[in-house]
Image (cartoon, helix red, strand yellow):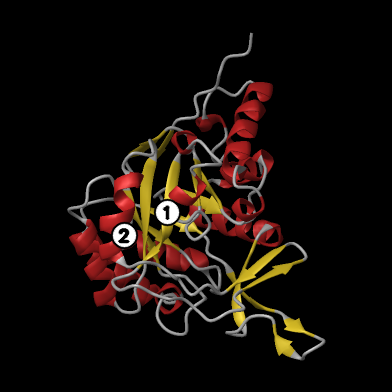
C-alpha cells in the first residue's frame, strides 16, 4: 500500500498545509471562488494587490487572450486597504488556509501606509510586496527593475512589518538574480518569482492596440519555460525561499518549479479557465508523489539533476 506523502510546506517561518497557492490578481479576495472550491484545501490564498487608496483600474479593453495565455492591463483595481480590512478580512479569517496580502504602492509612503494599517489586522500570514506590476503608468515596476530601489523599499518596509515580507520580482529585468540578492540583503523573508511579462497585441482590422493602455502583462503557459529559468536562477542566488509561478496549470508544471528550487507554487491564469485549477494541481501533485514513492516535498525541492 502506497504511503500518503507529506505535502506540508515550510515557507519563511510559515507552515502551509501544502505548497499550492493562488496568485494575486487571479483569485479576487477568495470569496469569489468559495462556491466552486473548498478554500480550506489550498495552501494559501494571495489576495489581489492592496493599495493605500481605492484604485478604479485601467479603462477597457484590458484583457486579451493570446495563443497561449493572456495579456492583462487591469491596473491593480482594488477596494483600498481600509475597505479591505473592514469588508474582506472577516471572510478571509474563516476560510481555513493561510492568507497572504499583496501590497502595492506608487511611492514608498504608499507601501508604508498599507503595511502600517495591516499590521494590527488579525488573520494575515504574510505580506507579498508587489514591486513588479507592468500594468500601471507610474510606480510599481520602477522599484522592481532597480537593485538599489528594491533594497531601499524592502529594508524600509521590513523594519516596520510585523509579518514575513515576501518580495514579488519582475521578469522584465536584465539580471533577476541581482534583484533577488538586493531583496535578500535588505531583509526579505522570501521571494515570489515572477510577475507578468510586458507585452502587446494589435488588431489588424482596426489598426488599434488590443489593450487600451497599449501594453499589458503576459501570463499563462507561454511564459512557463522562461519563468522556470528565473526561479532556477533565483533559488541558486539566494538562501531565502522562493515561490514559483508562471503558466502552472498541471501538477507536472508545479513539479518542474519545485525541481528548479521553488518551495511553493502559485496558480494564476489557469483560475480564469477553471476555478478549480489549484485543486487539480494539488490532487495531481499528490498522485505524482505517490506514483514515484516520494515521501515529502524535500524529495522534490531543488532535486533537478544536472
Q: Is residue 231 left or right of residue 201?
A: left
Front position in the image: 124 or 107: 124
Q: Please tell me which of labels 1 and 2 falls first in the chain.
A: 1
88 vs 35: above or below: below
Comparing 245 with 257, the one in front is: 245
The residue drawn where x is 56% and y is 18% is 4
Residue 161 location, x and y as percent?
22, 57
Which residue occupies the extreme top position in the image?
Answer: 1
Q: Are marks 1 and 2 in contact (CB under 8 Å)?
A: yes
The residue at 46%/67% (across/down) is 178
What percent of the width, then of the height, locates residue 45? Answer: 44, 47
Disc 2 target residue: 84
Q: Is residue 305 left or right of residue 235?
A: right
Q: Residue at x 60, y 51 (%)?
A: 271
Residue 28 appears at what percent x and percent y? Answer: 47, 56
Up/down of 306 relative to 203, above or below? above
- Asked whether the viewer can see residue 45, the reply is yes
Figure quadrant of the N terminus: top right
Q: Nearer the viewer, residue 135 or 30?
A: 30
Q: Position of residue 139 (x, y in %)?
A: 40, 80
| Alpha carbon separation for disc pair 1 and 2 | 9 Å
Q: Secondary structure at mark 2?
A: helix
Q: Judge the density around disc 1: few (<14), some (14-19), many (≥20) Cα neighbours within 10 Å.
A: many
Where disc 1 sits, the SS reads: loop
For label 1, the residue is 29
The numbered dot on residue 4 is none
Q: Residues within 10 Å of mark 2 (few under 14, many from 20)?
A: some
Amino acid at each position: 500500500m502506497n504511503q500518503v506523502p507529506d505535502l506540508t510546506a515550510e515557507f519563511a517561518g510559515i507552515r502551509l498545509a501544502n505548497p499550492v497557492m493562488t496568485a494575486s490578481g487571479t483569485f479576487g479576495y477568495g470569496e469569489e471562488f468559495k462556491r466552486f472550491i473548498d478554500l480550506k484545501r489550498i495552501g494559501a490564498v494571495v489576495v489581489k494587490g492592496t493599495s493605500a487608496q481605492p484604485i478604479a483600474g485601467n479603462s477597457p479593453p484590458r484583457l486579451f487572450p493570446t495563443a497561449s495565455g493572456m495579456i492583462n492591463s487591469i491596473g491593480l483595481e482594488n477596494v483600498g486597504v481600509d475597505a479591505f480590512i473592514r469588508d474582506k478580512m472577516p471572510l478571509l479569517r474563516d476560510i481555513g488556509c493561510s492568507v497572504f496580502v499583496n501590497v502595492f504602492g506608487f511611492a514608498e509612503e504608499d507601501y508604508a501606509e498599507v503595511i502600517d494599517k495591516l499590521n494590527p489586522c488579525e488573520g494575515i500570514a504574510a505580506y507579498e510586496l508587489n514591486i513588479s506590476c507592468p500594468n500601471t503608468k507610474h510606480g510599481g515596476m520602477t522599484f522592481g527593475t532597480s537593485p538599489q530601489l528594491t533594497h531601499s523599499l524592502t529594508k524600509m518596509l521590513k523594519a516596520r512589518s510585523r509579518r514575513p515580507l515576501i518580495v514579488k520580482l519582475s521578469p522584465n529585468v536584465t539580471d533577476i538574480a541581482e534583484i533577488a540578492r538586493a531583496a535578500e540583503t535588505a531583509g526579505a523573508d522570501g521571494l515570489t518569482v515572477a510577475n507578468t511579462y510586458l507585452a502587446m497585441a494589435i488588431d489588424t482590422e482596426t489598426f488599434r492596440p488590443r489593450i487600451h493602455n497599449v501594453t499589458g502583462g503576459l501570463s499563462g503557459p507561454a511564459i512557463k519555460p522562461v519563468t522556470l529559468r528565473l526561479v532556477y536562477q533565483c533559488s541558486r542566488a539566494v538562501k531565502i525561499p522562493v515561490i514559483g509561478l508562471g503558466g502552472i496549470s498541471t501538477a507536472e508544471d508545479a513539479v518542474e518549479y519545485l525541481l528548479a528550487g521553488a518551495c511553493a507554487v502559485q496558480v494564476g491564469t489557469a483560475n480564469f479557465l477553471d476555478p478549480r485549477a489549484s485543486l487539480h494541481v494539488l490532487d495531481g501533485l499528490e498522485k505524482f508523489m505517490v506514483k514515484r514513492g516520494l515521501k515529502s516535498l524535500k524529495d522534490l525541492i531543488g532535486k533537478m539533476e544536472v
